[in-house]
Image (cartoon, helix red, strand yellow):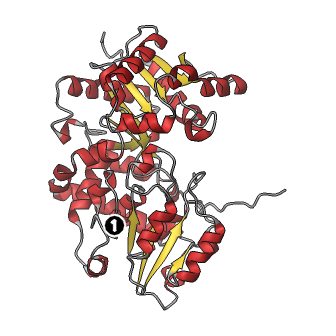
């Protein structure tokens, strides 16, 4: 590799993602461009692979990503797959025909002009495709980490396996849960929980448990809705609509338990219409869509410490709930199952009444915070990111990443520093921090 110089490809999905031209602009402009700059300043050879819609958006806004751009045309994509949903589904499940693999590999190599990357940072495209296009290269799936929205810090991840049931936490679920953290490690995560509980949620939470219970409900369960129409969500479970997901749960939950439902900020397709929400609240007396609280941005984050449990397919709110020793029910197959109290709703009443602490889930979260999820500002640190990519590439080429969960290097060798940095970069701990309130549109 010539010292630490690495040939790195940032690959944004070339399809018109979620039917919205330029849909990936936020990630490119606000996250990737800073990382590209840092990597190039540290001597790396960096390229960017885009679809036509993203190139059009960059040109229209006069945005320069700071590296060579290679473009994949729509006509070339549609000559291999019928649409992006089909393409991602087939790629994620590794169901490509030989013809599809050969054509996709030929398309990528032609468009990169035979320039061969050593590391590919893939966004939304299932990372599995890079394993057969560039067999010696390390493919990494970029996504948000355990935390990404206020009042928490913004963490991100580069997963060598992919997303959902293909991800690192899913791949090593058993090993992560069986790992016994040391007393020092337990003290670190306990301190993080204590600081967050005392300095954020006890002092700055605009919502109280009392106003949720109304002296009426024994338990409260939070259901953070997701959205449909993309593989990164749809492959987490059998549900292809948020309505089906919710009604399935409503029929399982004890009537004496209050159900709080929050909407995802990206609900473009598959959202539940207002008239349907009204019908459901009339049918299920214990259901609330939290209209009176919807003015607060990132509502699920504020509700999680106040409720007794969370039900999800793949929301990172599941991690937050486990951090605060809440019951986590998963009804799918993805990375969140690594910290689930139960992977079904069959005995939900009995599970909710169990007062035992889930130390295994806390061990998983500790490992993820020290090896898997890292601060966004580290992603922009060209020296740190170069060294991490170099370490990951060596572990991959030696065949260790697939076999050993500890082959994913520590974010920093000083584990105390990892937690100190997380705390120092938590916006909710800023002295003047106040929960964000959505402003009404002024027309």
Q: Tell me which residue sits at (33%, 66%) in the image.
A: 329
Residue 138: image location, x then y, percent:
31, 25
Residue 155: image location, x then y, percent:
43, 45
Q: Nearer the viewer, residue 35 or 100?
A: 100
Q: Nearer the viewer, residue 428 or 2?
A: 2
The answer to whether residue 187 of the structure is visible from this angle is: no
Q: Tell me which residue sits at (17%, 27%) in the image.
A: 399
Q: Left or right: where does residue 210 sit relative to residue 345?
A: right
Compared to 364, does 216 lie above or below? below
From this viewpoint, which residue is outermost toward the right?
A: 443
Q: Tell me which residue sits at (47%, 72%) in the image.
A: 202
Residue 433: image location, x then y, percent:
58, 60
Q: Quadrant of the C terminus?
A: bottom right
Compared to 16, does 355 lie above or below? below
Residue 20: image location, x then y, percent:
63, 38
Compared to 29, does 70 lie above or below? above
Q: Nearer the viewer, residue 192 or 389?
A: 389
Per the image, the residue denoted by label 1 is 328
Q: Quadrant of the N terminus?
A: top left
**SS assignment at label 1:** strand
The answer to whether residue 440 of the structure is visible from this angle is: yes
Q: Left or right: where does residue 303 sit relative to residue 74?
A: left
Q: Tell me which residue sits at (77%, 57%) in the image.
A: 441
Q: Count residues near mark 1 (Cα–Cα under 10 Å), then give few for <14, some for 14-19, many for 20+.
A: many
Image quadrant of residue 384?
top left
């Amino acid at each position: 590799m010539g010292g630490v110089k690495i040939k790195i490809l940032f690959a944004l999905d070339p399809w018109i993602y979620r039917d919205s031209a330029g849909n990936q602009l936020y990630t490119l402009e606000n996250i990737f461009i800073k990382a590209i700059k840092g990597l190039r300043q540290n001597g790396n050879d960096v390229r960017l692979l885009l679809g036509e819609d993203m190139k059009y958006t960059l040109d229209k806004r006069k945005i320069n990503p700071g590296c060579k751009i290679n473009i994949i045309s729509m006509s070339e994509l549609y000559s291999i797959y019928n649409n992006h949903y089909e393409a991602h589904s087939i790629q994620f499940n590794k169901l490509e025909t030989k013809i599809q693999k050969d054509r996709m590999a030929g398309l990528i190599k032609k468009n990169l002009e035979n320039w061969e990357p050593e590391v590919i940072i893939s966004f939304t495209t299932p990372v599995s495709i890079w394993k057969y296009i560039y067999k010696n290269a390390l493919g990494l799936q970029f996504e948000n980490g355990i935390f990404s929205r206020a009042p928490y810090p913004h963490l991100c991840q580069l997963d060598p396996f992919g997303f959902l049931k293909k991800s690192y936490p899913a791949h090593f679920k058993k090993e992560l849960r069986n790992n016994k953290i040391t007393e020092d490690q337990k003290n670190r995560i306990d301190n993080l929980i204590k600081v967050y509980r005392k300095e954020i949620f006890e002092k700055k939470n605009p919502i109280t448990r009392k106003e949720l219970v109304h002296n009426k409900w024994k338990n409260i369960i939070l259901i953070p809705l997701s959205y449909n129409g993309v593989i990164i969500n749809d492959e987490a479970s059998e549900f292809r609509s948020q309505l089906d997901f919710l009604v399935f749960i409503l029929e399982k939950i004890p009537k004496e338990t209050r159900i709080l439902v929050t909407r995802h900020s990206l609900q473009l397709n598959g959202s539940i219409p207002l008239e349907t929400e009204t019908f459901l609240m009339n049918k299920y007396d214990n259901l609330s869509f939290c209209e009176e609280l919807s003015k607060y941005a990132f509502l699920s984050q504020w509700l999680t410490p106040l409720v007794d449990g969370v039900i999800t397919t793949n929301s990172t709110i599941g991690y937050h709930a486990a951090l605060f020793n809440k019951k986590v029910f998963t009804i799918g197959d993805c990375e969140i199952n690594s910290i689930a109290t139960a992977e079904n709703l069959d005995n939900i009443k009995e599970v909710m009444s169990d007062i035992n602490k889930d130390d295994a889930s806390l061990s998983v979260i500790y490992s993820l915070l020290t090896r898997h999820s890292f601060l966004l500002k580290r992603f922009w640190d060209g020296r740190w990111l170069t060294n991490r990519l170099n370490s990951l590439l060596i572990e991959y080429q030696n065949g260790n990443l697939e076999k050993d969960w500890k082959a994913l290097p520590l974010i920093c060798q000083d584990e105390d520093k990892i937690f100190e940095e997380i705390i120092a970069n938590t916006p909710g701990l800023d002295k003047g921090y106040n929960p964000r309130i959505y402003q009404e549109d002024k027309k």
